[in-house]
Image: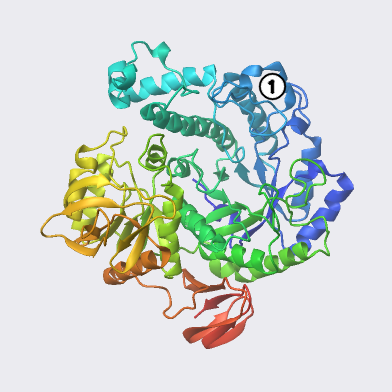
Amino acid sequence: MPGLSTVTNGRILFGGDYNPEQWPEETWHEDVRLMKDAGVNSVTVGVFSWAKLEPRPGAREFRWLDRVMDLMHEHGIGVVLATPTSSPPPWMGHLHPDTLPVDQDGRTEWWGGRQHFSHSSATYRRYAAAITEDLAARYGGHPALTMWHINNEYCTYDWSDRAAARFRDWLRARYGTLDALNEAWGTTFWSQGYGDWAEIHTPRHAHYMKNPGQVLDFKRFTSDMLLECCAAERDIVRRATPHLPVTSNFMPLWAGQDAWRWAAEEDVVSVDLYPDPRDPAGAQHGALVQDMTRSQARGPWMLMEQAAGPVNWRGVNHPKPRGLNRLWSLQAVARGADAVCYFQWRQSRQGAEKFHSGMVSHAGEEGRTHQEVRQLGADLARISPRVTGRHSVNDIAILHDWNAWWASSQEGRPSAHVDHPAVLHAWHRALWEAHLTTDFAHPEHDLGGYRLVVVPQLYLLTDAAVDNLLAYVRGGGTLVSGFLTGVADEDDRVRPGGMDARLRDLFGIRTLHEWWPLDPGERAECDGFRGTLWSEEIEKTEDAVAEASYRGGELDGLPAVLRRDRAWYVSTLPEPEALRELLAGVAAGAGAVPVLDGLPGQVEAVRRGDLLFLLNHGRESVTVEVPGSHRDLLTDAEVSDAITLGRYGVAVLAS
């Protein structure tokens, strides 16, 4: 299959969503002038244009898009052409109410926003296929076309009767019989046994807590139904243009898609990334999303959307200070991006996102935002020949699985304050602040190439995943696991002993007597640190070592951090500095070390291929020791043994 390299051809793609239908045609010519001056070489067109392309059922208005495609080709700008199916025209919902999604309280979600489609509606799918077929037929041979973009940010849930019918079909395929479904869902509890498939519906509003097995399967089903919609459109454009890659943009760490499964179905993995410029952990959040996306892509990936300035959907929407847009864009390149794009090219004057920034803001071409965009375009052009297609090699893998996340977020759990993404961020941040670069992996992936595997939390683990972890440690790898891991099997059935027996043996846990969740603000005193969020009453085996124990309270003297050979178990969430020191120490023992020694705290060092990226996330200048002779590709300056990075400064060093 074609991939991102089919499009890049030695260039980093630079551009963003372009919505010319919002502007008079004379503005289009101004746009291409500014695009050329800024180094833009790729635009995404058509994402929200369905009503413009099909103003009435079956009608086609392609002439405006013809002119846009021709204009882009004339100026050497490639087009990522989107199917417009994320936002159906008003006539569709008006004429076909069956295309509208329904929430869990039975309320219809109407047009007037976006993503107002039922993934289970045969009518919606028919119209989506028809417009996709016609776009592929008309533009498949157009010389401006470089890639297809399916839909946009798939994120629609649907609890309607149509979805319930498809849910029953999905369940039949998964379980085969009602007896197997009843066993998987544990329906003997609360008299929930099903005797007819027709009795099963989507998990709608209930008087009290819902069946967690049903909710888990509904989340799996939703991800699969959205993937069916995406794959149907993907297959249409592939038939027309088998030589061109296809993508659909993920939202970062979003609960509604099993992104491991989705990534396997994409030619190019792309993501939208919007860290808060006021968030002290914004750079680390960006690094986490970039690491995860690169790992899903198993190589270079596409930053489909970011903001050049403020967004419009936070309570307070702060602009990016001078230099931050460049810094975070180059951070993405350092961590594997071969495309740096934005939503959107020109800031809208009307509509719901008119206060969301663009590459050309309301201030116009003289505004700071656009001037910084131009600088970034020049930077990317300088480094592109040495960057594109290069891979990163890391010694550490962090394990993440959507099924474990879905199951751990159920009602009625030991602590509502244990949030899977927050725990994941805490562990990634500890490694990031220790200057240790990481990949992400699914718990059933081949882990043999890593010196250290880290499991922040995987409440649900399949037997295959457990066996994989055991094989990894037997093969000489070092494993560190956080609490609430291996508690349940794939049906969310709690394993005997409260943790898989094989994992208890691996970590040296004789008995896990009780979970002791902590209240917000409560701390568990441990040897040399304090734990947060969680603690556990553990009895260890004789051959296990308590690397740290609880001090005081009900758990006094019991192990907080346990090790048996190369397998570590952390039964609390240490405060950030302590978690960083713990993981850095284990990593060093496993032979996983930072890219550079002695880095200042605010400086990130990442290797991509044979290049060393240095990124200063601080507002003050800092000097970084870089032994040897190098050339900074951004400035063409020679660097010997040390380099000074200004506020939000970046260097890309070639030896």
Q: Is residue 286 visible?
A: yes
Q: Residues within 10 Å of mark 1 (few under 14, many from 20)?
A: some
Residue 322 falls left or right of residue 638: right
> Seen from this angle, which residue lies furthest front?
553
Q: Secondary structure at mark 1?
A: helix
Identify whether 159 is placed above or below 220.
above
Q: How many marks?
A: 1
Identify whether 248 is placed above or below 53.
below
Residue ID at (43%, 44%): 260
Q: Position of residue 146 (x, y in %)?
A: 63, 48
Residue ID at (39%, 13%): 197
Q: Which residue is mark 1?
A: 93
Q: Position of residue 205 (x, y in %)?
A: 50, 23
Q: Position of residue 636 (x, y in %)?
A: 62, 81
> Seen from this angle, which residue lies furthest left?
542
Identify whether 193 is placed above or below 423.
above
Q: Position of residue 501 (x, y in %)?
A: 18, 44
Residue ID at (57%, 70%): 617
Residue ID at (42%, 70%): 434
Q: Nearer the viewer, residue 194 or 594?
A: 194
Amino acid identity at mark 1: Gly
